[in-house]
């Protein structure tokens, strides 16, 4: 088990949720889609709607774990010239008015140039709270995770329905902040119902870690969000939010409308007892 200062934004967030006996809501958006300036506003709108944590997707050319909605979103951001340095500047702008926990959701490649160590120092300095690296297996994560700890960044890890208990035990050993349970096999994307294996995965993971356990991938309706919240400590919604923001007009009014829709999911999560 790793040891980190318990005063970070993510830890404070989940501690406050526990004290209120309330479930959390984690919102995912792609940084830079439709622009980095819009990203600042989108985070503000999501926070106003009641989101507890925001994941900022780092656009990548080969997002193998993502479905069509997030792939297209990453492609639009890359076309806009979005890179890590621009994302860090965006986080700095968000931090001028907000203390909402921010997690970078990334593949390992974009984090390697010019060096992982430099990027993690800059991430912390900008105000990032944690990093979730989708394609970094636990067998190869030691030096990267050590660097995250050195820069006071949470290492948020994924576990999947196909992960045996022994592998989950190894994954959560190096995790901090929270553990992200993937609700189903496959890529991100909106689904018609919550996979039956999701609840069992949360139960198995909870037996192996004291960290908050969140559930995501495919959640797109208030009914699914409510069902996920009954199982987990928090719910992650990504593709559905990205899709809603992309379909609304790309202006402040459109972003307010998208956030109002997200609020229906948040209310479903918060109403779970």
Image (spheres, rainbow, N blue to C red):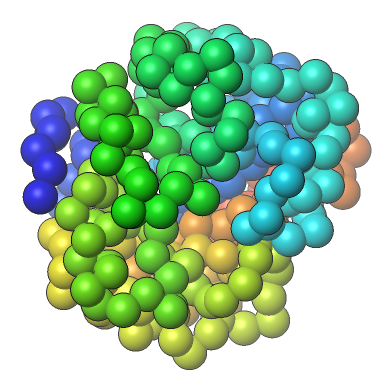
Residue positioned 34% across, 69% down in the render = 232
Residue positioned 44% across, 43% down in the render = 132
Residue sitting nearer the eye, 186 or 10: 186
Q: Is residue 98 shown above or below 254?
A: above
Pinpoint residue 175: horizontal percent, then vertical percent.
Answer: 25, 48
Pinpoint residue 31: horizontal percent, then vertical percent.
Answer: 66, 31
Pinpoint residue 7: horizontal percent, then vertical percent.
Answer: 16, 29
Residue sitting nearer the eye, 146 or 217: 146
Residue positioned 58% across, 34% down in the render = 109
Give the tally of numbered discs.
0
Residue positioned 43% across, 78% down in the render = 161
Quarter of the image for the C terminus: give it.
Answer: bottom left
| 6 lies left or right of 14 | left
Q: Is residue 43 visible?
A: no
Q: Is residue 4 shown above or below 82?
A: below
Q: Is residue 260 shown above or below 150?
A: below
Residue sitting nearer the eye, 44 or 116: 116
| 25 lies left or right of 63 | left
Q: Can you tell which quarter of the image residue 56 is in?
A: top right
Pinpoint residue 233: horizontal percent, then vertical percent.
Answer: 31, 63
Residue sitting nearer the eye, 61 or 21: 61
């Amino acid at each position: 088990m790793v040891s980190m200062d318990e005063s970070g934004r993510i830890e404070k967030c989940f501690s406050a949720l526990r004290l209120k006996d309330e479930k959390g809501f984690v919102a995912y958006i792609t940084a830079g889609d439709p622009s980095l300036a819009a990203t600042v506003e989108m985070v503000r709108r999501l926070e106003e709607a009641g989101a507890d944590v925001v994941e900022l997707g780092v656009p990548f050319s080969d997002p193998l774990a993502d479905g069509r909605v997030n792939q297209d979103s990453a492609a639009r951001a890359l076309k806009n010239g979005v890179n890590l340095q621009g994302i860090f500047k965006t986080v700095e702008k968000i931090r001028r008015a907000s203390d909402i926990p921010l997690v970078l959701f990334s593949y390992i490649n974009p984090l390697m140039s010019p060096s992982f160590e430099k990027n993690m120092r800059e991430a912390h300095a900008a105000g990032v709270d944690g990093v979730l690296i989708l394609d970094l297996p636990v067998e190869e994560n030691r030096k990267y995770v050590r660097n995250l700890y050195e820069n006071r960044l949470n290492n948020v890890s994924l576990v999947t329905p196909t992960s045996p208990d022994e592998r989950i035990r190894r994954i959560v050993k190096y995790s901090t902040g929270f553990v992200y349970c993937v609700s189903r096999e496959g890529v991100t994307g909106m689904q018609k119902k919550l996979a039956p294996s999701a609840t069992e995965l949360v139960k198995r993971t909870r037996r192996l870690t004291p960290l908050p356990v969140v559930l995501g991938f495919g959640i797109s309706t208030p009914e699914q969000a409510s069902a996920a919240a009954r199982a987990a400590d928090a719910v992650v919604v990504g593709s559905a939010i990205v899709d809603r923001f992309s379909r609304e007009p790309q202006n402040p009014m459109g972003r307010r409308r998208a956030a109002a829709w997200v609020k229906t999911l948040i209310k479903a999560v918060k109403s779970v007892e």
